[in-house]
Image (spheres, helix red, strand yellow):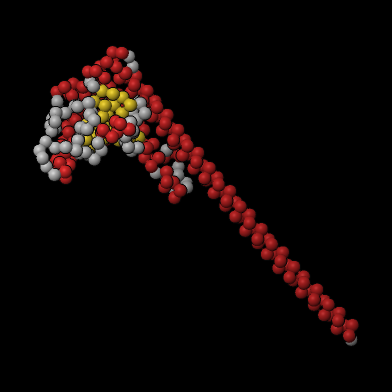
């Protein structure tokens, strides 16, 4: 009787341990699946990060190549030989900054005037068609998002007026100058302009900034704001800028947002 009792108790104890071992084995399998799932997720995220870095580097490389190639094209067109260089620098009072792709014309307007002077019209009539011919080449045309004409003035005004009044007066003056330059260049009688008229109307805009971006600072530092890497400068403090913004620049500014859009398509670049 006693042996029978202890025999049954031993059997129940053995069944109890077998049940626990089954549970532990099941938990180990679950933990294993969780670990595998986690590792796969980490691997996927790592691949996404690597892919992002490749896209960003490709974008930066494409932008640099585009900028360098365009700078070389502008230099060849306007400073490619002594005759061109003399016309550009001596006659037009122009300059070219290769690093910032900045072409400048010094003192294009009469002080306080919004009327495009006849002499400046002569320069624009020669310059602008050649400039647009370069921008509309196959290598650049589809990469350009905007060509913006910006009017800039000094911080001074002819009359002794408060600073704020001078700023607003110069704002109106700079806007009028930019619009007048735009009106003139779009109506230049040249096949390079007429055949690209639709493209120009889509891309070219006019803006006046008064003295908010003094050209003196840009000339001394040799680097316009990052958003405005391509520009045509007219004078140290009273200027007209033709600013080309490329698609690459917009995408570069959007890089911080890419983390929110890990599946960004390379075709957007």
**Pick the front one: 100 or 150:** 100
Residue at the image point whose x is 82% and y is 80% from the top = 9
Position of residue 57 measured from the top left corner of the image (x, y, whole percent):
47, 37
Quarter of the image for residue 233 reads top left
In the picture, measured across the screen, residue 10 lies left or right of residue 262, that is: right
In the picture, measured across the screen, residue 143 lies left or right of residue 49, that is: left
Q: In the displayed image of the protein, which residue is found farthest to the front? A: 160
**Which image quarter holds the C terminus?**
top left
In the picture, measured across the screen, residue 163 lies left or right of residue 244, that is: left
Residue at the image point whose x is 75% and y is 68% from the top = 21
In the picture, measured across the screen, residue 110 lies left or right of residue 235, that is: left
Q: In the displayed image of the protein, which residue is found farthest to the bottom? A: 1
Residue 32 vertical placement versus 187 (above, below): below
Quarter of the image for residue 230 reads top left
Position of residue 106 measured from the top left corner of the image (x, y, whole percent):
22, 26
Position of residue 144 measured from the top left corner of the image (x, y, whole percent):
33, 33
Residue 132 shows up from this direction: no
Residue at the image point whose x is 31% and y is 28% from the top = 102
**Pick the front one: 129 or 4:** 129
Q: State how many labels appear.
A: 0
Residue at the image point whose x is 38% and y is 42% from the top = 253
Residue 209 vertical placement versus 138 (above, below): below
Quarter of the image for residue 153 reads top left
**Which image quarter holds the N terminus?**
bottom right
**Pick the front one: 88 or 199:** 88
Q: In the displayed image of the protein, which residue is found farthest to the left? A: 159
Position of residue 251 measured from the top left corner of the image (x, y, whole percent):
39, 40
Residue 103 shows up from this direction: yes
């Amino acid at each position: 009787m006693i042996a029978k009792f202890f025999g049954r108790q031993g059997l129940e104890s053995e069944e109890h341990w077998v049940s626990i071992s089954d549970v532990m084995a099941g938990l180990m399998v679950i933990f294993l699946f969780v670990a595998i799932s986690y590792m796969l997720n980490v691997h996927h995220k790592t691949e996404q990060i690597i892919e992002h870095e490749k896209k960003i580097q490709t974008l930066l490389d494409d932008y640099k190549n585009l900028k360098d190639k365009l700078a070389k094209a502008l230099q060849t067109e306007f400073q490619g030989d002594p005759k061109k260089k003399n016309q550009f620098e001596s006659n037009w009072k122009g300059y070219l900054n290769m690093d910032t792709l900045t072409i400048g014309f010094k003192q294009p307007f009469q002080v306080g005037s919004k009327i495009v002077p006849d002499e400046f019209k002569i320069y624009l009539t020669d310059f602008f068609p050649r400039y647009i011919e370069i921008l509309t080449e196959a290598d650049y045309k589809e990469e350009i998002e905007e060509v913006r004409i910006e009017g800039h003035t000094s911080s001074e005004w002819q009359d002794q007026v408060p600073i704020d009044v001078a700023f607003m007066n110069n704002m109106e003056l700079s806007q009028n100058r930019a619009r007048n330059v735009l009106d003139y260049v779009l109506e230049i009688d040249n096949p390079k302009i007429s055949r690209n008229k639709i493209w120009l109307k889509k891309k070219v805009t006019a803006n006046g900034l008064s003295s908010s971006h003094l050209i003196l600072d840009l000339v001394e530092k040799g680097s316009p704001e990052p958003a405005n890497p391509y520009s045509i400068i007219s004078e140290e403090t009273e200027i007209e800028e033709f600013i080309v913004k490329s698609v690459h620049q917009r995408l570069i500014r959007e890089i911080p947002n890419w983390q929110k859009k890990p599946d960004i398509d390379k075709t957007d670049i």
